[in-house]
Amino acid sequence: MAVKLRLVRMGKKKQPTYRIVAADSRAPRDGRFLELLGTYAPRGASVAEPSAVVRIDNEKAVQWLLQGAQPTDRVERLLKGSGAWDQFVATRSG
């Protein structure tokens, strides 16, 4: 089973929020997933906070990466921003 780290769309029409999940690559985008790793709100959490909000459980994300999960391009950028990607590279290299 090939595992991907990807986004699942949530939220209202024209107000997206996303969950970052580990899912089987054959499952549909908004379908079944194996584990929830975090959330991503590109429009901010509220009107008062307009910048993007990213919350990722770095330990879970690194564990999935070490087991061979492949992140999508967007999720890889989010992992780099949260520091999980650096942890993964450090543990993998030695």
Image (tube, grey):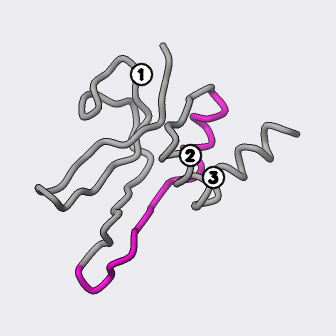
Q: Which residue is mark 2?
A: 76
Instruction: Answer above or below: position of 74 versus 2.
Output: below
Instruction: Return the mark for residue 78.
Output: none
Q: Report the magenta residues as a range.
A: 47-67
Circle 1 Cα neighbour tier, 10 Å, few/some/many (<14 / 14–19 / ≥20): some
Report the mark closest to the observer, 3 or 2. Answer: 2
The residue indicated by pointer 1 is 25
Figure quadrant of residue 50: bottom left
Residue kind at label 3, given as amino acid type: Ala
Q: Which quadrant would residue 34 be assigned to in this image?
A: top left
Q: How many marks?
A: 3
Image location of residue 33, percent across then percent down: 34, 30
Q: Looking at the picture, which amino acid does disc 1 mark?
A: Ser
Of the two numbered discs 3 and 1 on the same chain, state the one appearing first in sequence: 1
- Please tell me whether mark 2 sits on a helix, a strand or a loop: helix
Secondary element under disc 1, as helix, strand or loop, is loop
Given contact means CB atoms under 8 Å apart, are the residues at marks 3 and 1 in contact? no
Q: Identify the image quadrant of the C terminus.
A: top right
Residue 53 lies in the magenta stretch? yes
Q: Is residue 54 left or right of residue 94?
A: left
Q: Mark 3 or mark 2: name the one nearer the start of the chain.
A: 2
> What is the residue that sits farthest to the bottom in this orientation?
48
Foreground of the two, 37 or 44: 44
Q: CA distance from mark 3 to mark 2?
A: 9 Å
Along the line of sight, the residue nearer the viewer: 35 or 76: 76
Disc 1 or 2, which lies upstream in sequence? 1
